[in-house]
Amino acid sequence: MTKLDELRNGIDEVDQKIIALLAQRFQYTEEVGIYKAENHLDSQDVSRENQQFQKIAKLSAQYGLNPAYASEIYRCIIDIVISRHEELLKSTCN
């Protein structure tokens, strides 16, 4: 096995862990979305988002990850979550 193969295997292992954690995260956000829909709360909570992005910046720096990279990734994740929460809210309004 070459060094490149070893590195790629490491990437594959990390990807598996990331997907498992994303699945877990989306399970929680689905429950949040259902709660928001049932209680007629807004799909987006800007205050919570700001707190999350501050936390993400700190964690990124702590782990040696460029905070801009992490923020961009999380912006995508949060946008997907908001979209799903909007779907859930619409489905309870119908």
Image: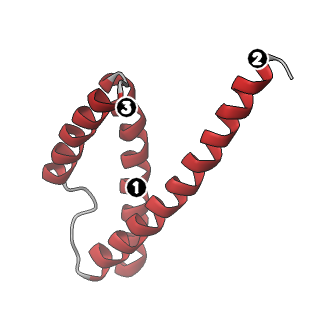
Front disc: 2 or 1: 2
Give the farthest residue toward the right: 1
x and y percent of residue 42 in the render? 22, 64
Of 37 and 74, the residue lying toward us: 74
Q: Find numbered disc 1 in the image and state the secondary structure of the residue it sits on.
A: helix
Front disc: 1 or 3: 3
Q: Is residue 90 above or below residue 23?
A: below
Split into 4 quadrants, where in the image is the N terminus? top right
On the image, numbered disc 2 is attached to which residue? 3
x and y percent of residue 92 in the render? 38, 80
- Determine whether, in the image, residue 87 is placed left or right of residue 46: right
- Determine whether, in the image, residue 3 is placed left or right of residue 48: right
3D distance between C-alphas at marks 2 and 3: 27 Å
On the image, numbered disc 1 is attached to which residue? 81
Mark 3 belongs to which amino acid?
A: Ala
Residue 70 — which label?
3
- N-terminal of the pair, mark 2 or mark 1, is 2
Tell me what residue is drawn at x 38 percent, y 46 percent. 79
3D distance between C-alphas at marks 1 and 3: 16 Å
Residue 49 — which label?
none
